[in-house]
Image: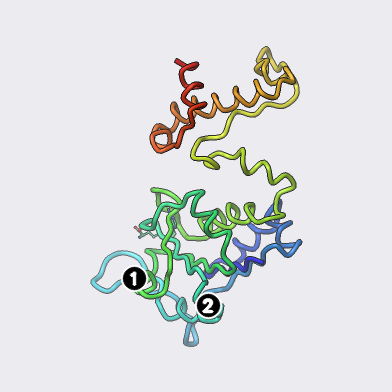
Amino acid sequence: MLRIDVITLFPEVIEAGVRYSIVGRACEWGLTQVRALQLRDFAAGKHRKTDDEPYGGGAGLVIKPEPIFKAVEFCRPTAHTRIVLLEPQGKLYTQAIAHELAEQEHLILICGHYEGVDARVREHLATDVLSIGDYVLTGGELPALIIIDSVVRLLPGALHSPESLAQDSYADGLLGYPQYTRPEEFRGMRVPSVLLSGNHGAIARWRRREQLRLTRTLRPDLFARACLTSDDVELLKELE
Ligand SMILES: C[S@@+](CC[C@H](N)C(=O)[O-])C[C@H]1O[C@@H](n2cnc3c(N)ncnc32)[C@H](O)[C@@H]1O
């Protein structure tokens, strides 16, 4: 079972975010356990102060190191625990990292707020520093939920149809193919006829060709890194 501890000033956000759908079900089924810890509970003093002004001056407040170190220690990390600090300066989170995290037994996710977290957390406590994209959010709670969601759906037993993982975008370095459902025609827009043909070989070829076409058009950066087979090269010739 994957244990996930989230250290945050807003545990309610995490608790609400893991209650529904696939993640909620995975928690109920015991595939994972998500615990949100209130950072303030680990702060010292009558006022349980978790933040202070930055040394050197400047705007805003910085989260103090002591409560974060104490909260992580409370989670009893082992040598294998991945202690993930969420920061916009972190390594860009990808599906490959989601797969890696889904194989762990224990994750600790540290959510920053305000101007961020005292740099000693990054330097001496975190095993990983991850960013969910090149933009700045108010706090680490949404990034933590994004990581939890993307990791938990990879856990064995989490999805009703695990084969759908293989069809997902990024599963093999390409974007996913377009999906259609009933009705066959909607406001004059028709489902591609090959999908109605019942010819499984033709459908598989069409889907792969669409994956190649979409990735080349929408994500040339991914396309440049994709490992293409000789069949893919043939399909690409058809697109020319
Ligand atoms: C307002 S941000 C701090 C931004 C920081 N001053 C900077 O410029 O990098 C507050 C917190 O939100 C979280 N956060 C914001 N954007 C994020 C992103 N793109 N990925 C991961 N965490 C993010 C982090 O936990 C961060 O400590």
Q: Quadrant of the N terminus?
A: bottom right
Q: Is residue 232 above or below residue 165?
A: above
Q: Is residue 6 above or below residue 146?
A: below
Amino acid type for the residue under numbered disc 1: Ala
Q: Quadrant of the C terminus?
A: top left
Q: Is residue 37 above or below residue 152?
A: below
Considering every residue shown, the one lying at the far top of the view is 188
Circle on res. 119: 1
Circle on res. 78: 2
Picture coordinates of residue 176 (x, y %)? 56, 34
Picture coordinates of residue 133 (x, y %)? 43, 49
Foreground of the two, 222 or 46: 222
Point out the quarter of the image occupied by ligand 1: bottom left
Amino acid type for the residue under numbered disc 2: Thr
Quarter of the rendering containing residue 227: top left
Q: How is the image coloured?
A: rainbow
Tag 2, which secondary structure?
A: loop
Report whether the residue tagged 1 is closer than 8 Å to ligand 1.
Answer: no
Circle on res. 39: none
Report whether the residue tagged 2 is closer than 8 Å to ligand 1.
Answer: no
User: Which of marks 1 and 2 precedes in the sequence?
Assistant: 2
Query: Relative to 63, is 9 on the left or the right?
Result: right
